[in-house]
């Protein structure tokens, strides 16, 4: 998915505050245990990638958004900029295969059609080593959110730089038949004494357990495990996350 420039600009500031570190720790641990090249699909601004690289992981990243890749490359030295590139999860070309491929932070929810989902799974399968592992996560659907949506809610209220305020107001419009939540995010910020405001709307596809099992079964991958949290706990009615582990057939 491509991101507007103002979303990329404030991405790190917002998610440093509102995103928990549970998934970050899980994926970082898996990167360090991979004992080989790692690919992050949907690398974004490098929330996970940069820490993996800093700790010595042989990590690479792709993202469909040129804005995201430019942002991340600006944080890298000349020797490491080759590690990240613009790439579409559904069809990408790289020069190596990977022991571990990850798609964190609900990347798969941006693939709204079954055709795109299968294309991504099969593209990823082509770049796994024979003993490689693919891990991704999705949110377990919230029945209330998926049926009633969410009225405008302030989910970030802080500063994007000292003395410059930033608010984000998020709302959700549900589409039950297409299993999609249409998310709208209003960004309101102060810059050079002027109040700025821009809005972004995008779809987020949600999935159910057996749907995921059937989807993976149709692909070139095999489901190895499906957990209910980032501690690899069992999937239960209280689970907020699907953590899905796949291998080659």
Image (tube, helix red, strand yellow):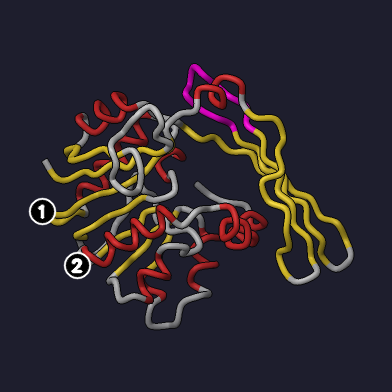
Is the residue marked by circle 1 packed among few (<14), some (14-19), or many (20+) residues within 10 Å?
some
Question: Which residue has dot 2 on it?
Answer: 36
Q: Position of residue 4 (x, y in %)?
A: 62, 52
Q: Position of residue 171 (x, y in %)?
A: 67, 35
Residue at 51%, 19% (x, y): give it: 176
Q: Is residue 95 left or right of residue 84?
A: left
Quadrant assignment for the C terminus: top left
Residue at 47%, 63% (x, y): give it: 47
Magenta segment? 172-182
Q: Position of residue 172 (x, y in %)?
A: 62, 31
Is the residue marked by circle 2 packed among few (<14), some (14-19), or many (20+) residues within 10 Å?
some
Q: Nearer the viewer, residue 243 or 38?
A: 243
**Residue at the right extreme?**
193
Element at label 2? loop
| Quarter of the rendering containing residue 118 | top left
Q: Position of residue 92 (x, y in %)?
A: 32, 53
Residue 221 showing in the rendered view = no
Residue at 73%, 63% (x, y): give it: 159
Question: Which residue has dot 1 on it?
Answer: 130
Q: Nearer the viewer, residue 137 or 231?
A: 231
Q: Is residue 216 magenta?
A: no
Q: Which mark is residue 183?
A: none
């Amino acid at each position: 998915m491509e991101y507007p420039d103002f979303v990329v600009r404030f991405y790190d500031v917002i998610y440093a505050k509102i995103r928990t570190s549970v998934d970050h720790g899980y994926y970082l641990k898996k990167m360090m245990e991979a004992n080989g090249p790692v690919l992050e699909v949907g690398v974004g601004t490098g929330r996970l990638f940069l820490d993996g690289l800093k700790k010595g992981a042989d990590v690479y990243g792709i993202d469909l958004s040129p804005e995201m890749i430019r942002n991340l490359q600006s944080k890298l030295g000349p020797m490491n900029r080759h590690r990240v590139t613009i790439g579409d999860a559904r069809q990408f070309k790289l020069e190596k295969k990977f022991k571990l491929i990850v798609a964190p932070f609900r990347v798969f929810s941006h693939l709204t059609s079954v055709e795109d989902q299968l294309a991504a799974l099969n593209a990823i399968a082509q770049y796994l080593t024979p003993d490689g592992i693919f891990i991704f996560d999705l949110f377990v659907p919230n029945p209330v959110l998926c049926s009633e949506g969410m009225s405008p809610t302030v989910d970030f209220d802080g500063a994007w730089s000292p003395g410059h305020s930033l608010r984000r107001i998020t709302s959700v419009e549900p589409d039950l038949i297409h299993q999609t939540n249409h998310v709208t995010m209003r960004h309101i910020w102060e810059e050079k004494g002027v109040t700025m405001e821009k809005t972004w709307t995008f779809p987020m596809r949600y999935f159910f357990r057996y749907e995921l099992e059937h989807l993976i079964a149709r692909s070139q991958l095999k489901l190895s495990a499906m957990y209910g949290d980032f501690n690899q706990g069992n999937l239960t009615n209280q689970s907020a996350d699907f953590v899905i582990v796949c291998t080659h057939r």
